[in-house]
Image (spheres, rainbow, N blue to C red):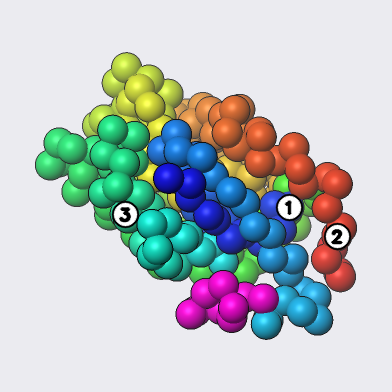
Amino acid sequence: MTLTLYIGNKRYSSWSLRGWLAARLTGAPVEERMIWLNRPETRAALLEASPSGRVPVLRHAGRTVWDSFAIGCYLDRQFPAAGLLPREADALALALAVTAEMHAGFQALRNNMSMDLVARLPGKGHAPGVAEDVARIQAIWSDCRQRFGAGGPWLFGRQPNLADCFYAPVATRFRTYGVALSGAAAAYCETLLAWPLFRAWEAAAPAEPALPGH
């Protein structure tokens, strides 16, 4: 059955990217429905699609699921063969924790280094708290790679999962703002930016209209 996914601008909407990557990992057909952000009609379109008034929103089998983390967990239950979450208990515990941390945290990074897949702004956005967020993210990436990354380039080894979907927009922020990384974190960032699924999403961004102020 087709997954219907409501998303925002591919250039800017990091949460939409997370939900889209998770949906694509299932292998099921995905119908995209774009809700353009920062337009007069945006708010009404968001409220029509989602109880929260935000994207992404998934519709599947008569159900509506909003919030990217909820979408990922739902898809894992519906498509267990896709491996969106690890099955081994220790790996599952870590994958859920680091995904939830990304979902709820890193406010300094979010507020000062917003996702923009087209712009290149080296040196910008280095406000108080950003360096600490960057250090924590590098530590997460290195820890996951060390503990569960054997056999492949992803956080949990041979195939991408929900944690990788959630950190993909972060890799784009590091690229946009010229954030220097090292070691395993630098290599993993390059893995995310070279991910064919991400590249397919990114390919649409340059043709989209820029938002005011960008």
Please report the residue visible at 81 percent of the width from the left and 81 percent of the height from the top: 40
Please report the residue visible at 34 percent of the width from the left and 34 percent of the height from the top: 82
Q: CA distance from mark 1 to mark 3?
A: 25 Å
117 with respect to 139 (left or right): right
- Along the line of sight, which residue is nearer the eye, 113 or 179? 113
Q: Amino acid at mark 3?
A: Cys
Structural crowding at the residue carrying mark 2, measured as other residues with C-alpha within 10 Å and reported as few (<14), some (14–19) or many (≥20) = some
Q: Amino acid at mark 2?
A: Ala
Q: Is residue 41 visible?
A: yes
**Which residue is identified by label 1?**
11
- Along the line of sight, which residue is nearer the eye, 73 or 212? 73
What span is in magenta?
A: 45-53
Give the answer, above or below, for where 68 lies relative to 162.
below
Q: Which mark is residue 73?
A: 3
Quadrant of residue 12 in the image?
Answer: bottom right
Q: CA distance from mark 2 to mark 3?
A: 32 Å
Structural crowding at the residue carrying mark 1, measured as other residues with C-alpha within 10 Å and reported as few (<14), some (14–19) or many (≥20) = many
Q: Which mark is residue 210?
A: 2
Give the answer, above or below, for where 17 lies relative to 84.
below
Please report the residue visible at 21 percent of the width from the left and 44 percent of the height from the top: 92
The residue furthest left is: 89
188 with respect to 77 (left or right): right
Q: Which comes before the other along the chain, label 1 or label 2?
A: 1
Residue 50 appears at what percent x and percent y?
Answer: 52, 74
